[in-house]
Image: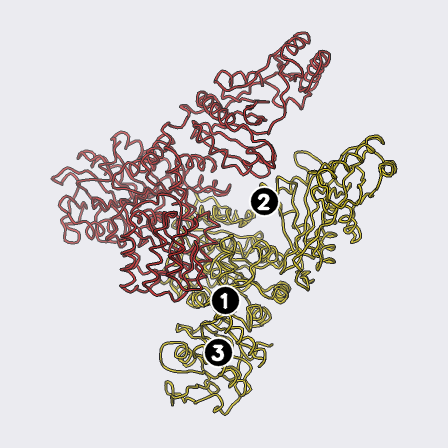
Chain colours: A yellow, B red
Amino acid sequence: MSLTKLLKPASIAIIGANEKPGFGGGTTKNILTYRKDLSRVYFIHPTREEVYGHKCYKKVDDVDDTIDLAVICTPQPTVLGLLREAHAKGCEAAVVYASGYSEIGPEGVALERELQDLAAELNMSIMGPNCGGFVNYVDDVYSFAFLGDYANKRGGIGFVSQSGKFVIDMMNSPELRFSYALSVGNSRVTTVEDYFEFLVNDPDTSVVAAYVEGIKNPIKFERSLRAAAQAKKPVLILKMGRSPKGQAAAASHTGSMSGADQIFDAVFKKYGVIRVDDMQDMRSTAALFGTLKALPKTAAFASLNQSGGERGLAADLGYMHGVEYPDFSEQTLKRMKELLADYASPSNPLDMTAGTPLNVYFETLAVGMADENVSAGLLGMLVGPNPIPAERMEGFAALAKKFPDKPMMLLNIMERPRNPEVVAAFQEMGIAVLPTMAYGFRAVRHLADFVEYCNAADAPTLSLAIPEKAPSGKTRALGEYSSKKLLQEAGVPVDVGEVVQSAEQAVEVAKRFGFPVVLKIESDDILHKSDVGGVKLNLKSEAEVAQAYADILDSAKQKMPGARINGVLVQKMLSQGIEMILGVNSDPQFGPMLLVGLGGVFVEVFKDASLYPCPLDRKEAEQMLTSLKAYKLLTGYRGGEPADVEALIDTIVAVSEFAVRHKDSLKELDINPLFVYPKGKGVAIADALVILHD
Amino acid sequence: MSLTKLLKPASIAIIGANEKPGFGGGTTKNILTYRKDLSRVYFIHPTREEVYGHKCYKKVDDVDDTIDLAVICTPQPTVLGLLREAHAKGCEAAVVYASGYSEIGPEGVALERELQDLAAELNMSIMGPNCGGFVNYVDDVYSFAFLGDYANKRGGIGFVSQSGKFVIDMMNSPELRFSYALSVGNSRVTTVEDYFEFLVNDPDTSVVAAYVEGIKNPIKFERSLRAAAQAKKPVLILKMGRSPKGQAAAASHTGSMSGADQIFDAVFKKYGVIRVDDMQDMRSTAALFGTLKALPKTAAFASLNQSGGERGLAADLGYMHGVEYPDFSEQTLKRMKELLADYASPSNPLDMTAGTPLNVYFETLAVGMADENVSAGLLGMLVGPNPIPAERMEGFAALAKKFPDKPMMLLNIMERPRNPEVVAAFQEMGIAVLPTMAYGFRAVRHLADFVEYCNAADAPTLSLAIPEKAPSGKTRALGEYSSKKLLQEAGVPVDVGEVVQSAEQAVEVAKRFGFPVVLKIESDDILHKSDVGGVKLNLKSEAEVAQAYADILDSAKQKMPGARINGVLVQKMLSQGIEMILGVNSDPQFGPMLLVGLGGVFVEVFKDASLYPCPLDRKEAEQMLTSLKAYKLLTGYRGGEPADVEALIDTIVAVSEFAVRHKDSLKELDINPLFVYPKGKGVAIADALVILHD
């Protein structure tokens, strides 16, 4: 299903066109107001002769032209019939505004299914139902029901949202310029993932922004994220459901399956997606990306301010948002000292001190921007409701021209109406007018994250290991030996040990391995071996081994009489290393997710763990580790020896490969603990548990 | 020095009154525009006959009235002479706008000192220099240099700031209503702490807001914080310097001594001060506190929204800011189900679903607000540039009247111009119009913090243990025995052990204590005993003790030949408990600060420590512990025994008392490790180090 006919139609029929308030009236008025070429726009109404002086046809069939897009403005009961009529005319795409579908409960769900079935039968793309329509600013297409000022808004932002309110909010933001604004409602036929994919691949869209309530087609969604990452096209997503209550809200609101929030975070991290927190964050960040003519080469900012207060705020907010202000070079500092008052003390962030003359102000900005250590500028320059004198605006224009590769943005410390002409003039120069500080710095942080993502490594090329079939819901656990065996077969280096059936065998194996050894009960039915007295550590002699064998079986039989016992596992006793946990959980939408963290307390008390989708490469595994707060415990904490991080990375990658190979059967893998030894000495898997879908 | 004459003058002389732009012109115009009673306002100018039709006097002395406040609008060189003239007339207070003082470097610093000396000589209160002046909205006093719209702004917010820009920003915020707005500049004579104290004690000020660059008089500042806490008057402070760079900026900007940022956080926590992050945070939070007619009884909110998008944002942002939405009662849910559409699924946060009729909307709000579990309401109700229909406004007015004790606030999801009349009408009802979400939720978080602070316990009555004299800068460390002895004398339970001078004595003491014992080198010169082989643990026999004694002395003499050795310390070997660290650092401004955290890694890697000023009581000690992320390790982690938290609290309080007793001499105390044993088994101090000012 191509979206071309839907979003880029050459001919349009407005079915239910009229002059009254409502979908028909709004759409008619919008297209007449904003579209230049009306030659292939047709208005359809059963009784009207004309609408705003334009001819009305009784029905679609009366139009003597092919119709690419039928915009159905009439109520729910009329929709199916009109779709059939349009289809009979050769039309392949429609917008359905009508509400009364799944958003009103079970009754509406049935109607929506009917609509979906008909669309499948007729092979039509359909936006909606229960939607606001769209504007395609690129080709001048207005199929939008709500009145507003949509003139001069052509730009690079493509926005798609199930909430019509959010689309209107974005369209009413004077600093935003769009390629497409899509209010797609229930998006039952043509899905959010379809629109999203369209925007990612659309050459007229430079920034993709989406409000996503839930994902129904993870394969298509992931493919689009990957394409955007490879194209280095920024993707902004507002995905609610950070809280347990929010997840419940999202699920009840759309009936979408709402994955655990951390899963989305992990997938977004892999593809450099900018996750925004709310609609203002979306708006500010879209405006920033939409305005800059070039991305900064690095995430290193010059903070150039006109007062001590501004400088203090820039320093603190920058610190809180992790924005980097590198030290200025000696040369820059020397030049600034020459330019500024004696009592100014140049640094980054800079306070030029109050009363700096305009020419000195701009010269100082130029010196700061020219510094070799900085790639972008955060300028303390407030934009309020009043116009800004021409001389000052010209100064900024000259500055922007001088530094085409070092984008600049203006900080603002209060929520104020900002003069739209001033904002537009700055945008014309490629200078972004940031909103109030918390939002401004968040947008800057998002920009820095994106730059760092693009600079860090090549974007992933492999698709996620999304399972091909839904799991049955039944699962079975494997004992430690079987779990380790499965890991070993997949190339994960692990000492599997040997399962024995008698004390004599145990002793024989122990002698072969060398003392000390460990004995453990081996049973698919016993997940918590210690709880049934099924683990004996540090056995140093034949006698100890024989005794342990007997004790383990006795204890297990007594405490779990029904358990099927495969034998007793004999392993070499591992020496203690840094304890880590390494696990995989298979997400029903995005497949196996790998988790790594330092032993028990760190993960459980401090939630210090890193989650990432499979497959992953060494670079990604390394990023997982360095993102841990406890990472410094691996690099030689308090004079200790650095751990064998390379071997740990190898193991993470091998486990990821294991998870990918078993993506359709693996539900869960827990390696706990994994011992990491000093550099050069490798790692060792002490215990492993695999749970499979049955 | 009373501020009454300065801030509440009965008669005012504007010295340098005129009609031109500038300090004189601005002040003249402002007072003429906004002050009703001009009978005791006198305009002084050496050559003018009149100003805006009002009589001008040549000099202050010509005025036939006493003068409470002289507003000196003229440049720096004229200031001292004019102050003398005013003083000769009996005037005790002045505003000095002139710049050219400490803000311009060393030369200005000298001039400022002269001004300060003269003020001391004449015993005058002086605002400034380099300031913008003030407005006292309570008594209708305008000694303010910058033009603006200052009508109808009387309210409860008292704001003081060294930055004039920030004062203007606040005064230009249409939703703020002030008692006082004070732009106090360099505040060399009358200090920020003086104004702050005035506002805290002022009955017309219900919210104290301050931009503080640094504190020069911690005793006065702390006294004011304590008074505010006892009066449950909210105090909002913007204190920059969160980052190392910001601290440097603050120091260079004002020459104020800028304490470590965490010290301020600790002091603010003790007194329930609301620390805001930036000026918009200040503004939003001041507006919230300034609008509500009552504080919520608890920090439990009903979130009542009109759409799924709003509900999702409220859920997520609330979660991110720790805002509590308790579950609605069964009765509330039942009533909501009756009111709302079949497909609505009532919960907190609530989505009423789109298209809810107005009467149902208000009825649902009333049902939600009436719920016994909630104390306040966060209503999804956007305020934009347009007026809101009267019917709707009346609905809110009725709602506010119905719930006088449950304050309500309106959420807004985008940064937009908001209609000032609408905002004012809501404020009249006691309903706060929150700014864009991140700021709105931050303000709500601040409100919740304040409510929780007020509900948690009585405010502290004891003053901080601020040292009475500045330390010499020289310090000396005490050995472990002397350190522990000092703690013991102050009532901290600690086993000090015994210092011995021979192997025989060591053995004798060990036998008395019972084996195993520990031997440690005892020397004020050896801070790191282990590094010189000065510690022998777990000595189980007489022979081991004798050998250890010899080894310790040999090793210490060899590795630190110059160290003065007091002997060898014999102690009972402690059994292992949960390792904690407990320390005190004396802040030069606020005195001893107590730090507590769980052993090494937690404090060092996760920065999981709690800092709090002394003295503190059991309740405060408990709050320090429960604020630790690792606190759960003390309460029986993973089925372990709960630790003796009561004994730990006793020890924290005892250490605080120790620190208070030694506030003038104590520089630092480190108890590391402190072992905490299972419930009922107490704690033990394994090692202690005291560093004193010499």
SS at mark 2? loop
Reading the image, the residue beneath label 1 is A161
Residue B166 against residue A18 in the figure, above or below: above
Label 3 sits on a secondary structure element that is: loop
Horizontally, residue B634 falls left or right of residue A311, namely: right
Q: Quadrant of residue B274?
A: top left
Mark 2 lies on residue: A607
The quarter of the rendered structure image containing the N terminus of chain B is top left
Q: Which residue is mark 3?
A: A140
Mark closer to the observer (1, 3) = 1
Query: Residue B134 versus residue A634: which sits nearer the camera?
Result: A634
Cα separation, mark 3 vs mark 2, equals 50 Å
User: Looking at the image, is mark 1 or mark 3 earlier in the sequence?
Assistant: 3
Q: Height in image: A424 above or below A92?
A: above
Q: Are marks 3 and 2 on the same chain?
A: yes
Residue A443 appears in the picture as rendered:
no
Q: Depth check: give the residue in front, A151 or B442.
A: B442
Which residue in the rendered view is the most extreme toward the left?
Answer: B64
Quick one: label 3, few (<14), some, or many (20+) residues within 10 Å?
some
Tags 2 and 1 touching, CB below 8 Å:
no
The subunit carrying tag 1 is: A
| Relative height, residue B264 to residue B431 (above, below) | above
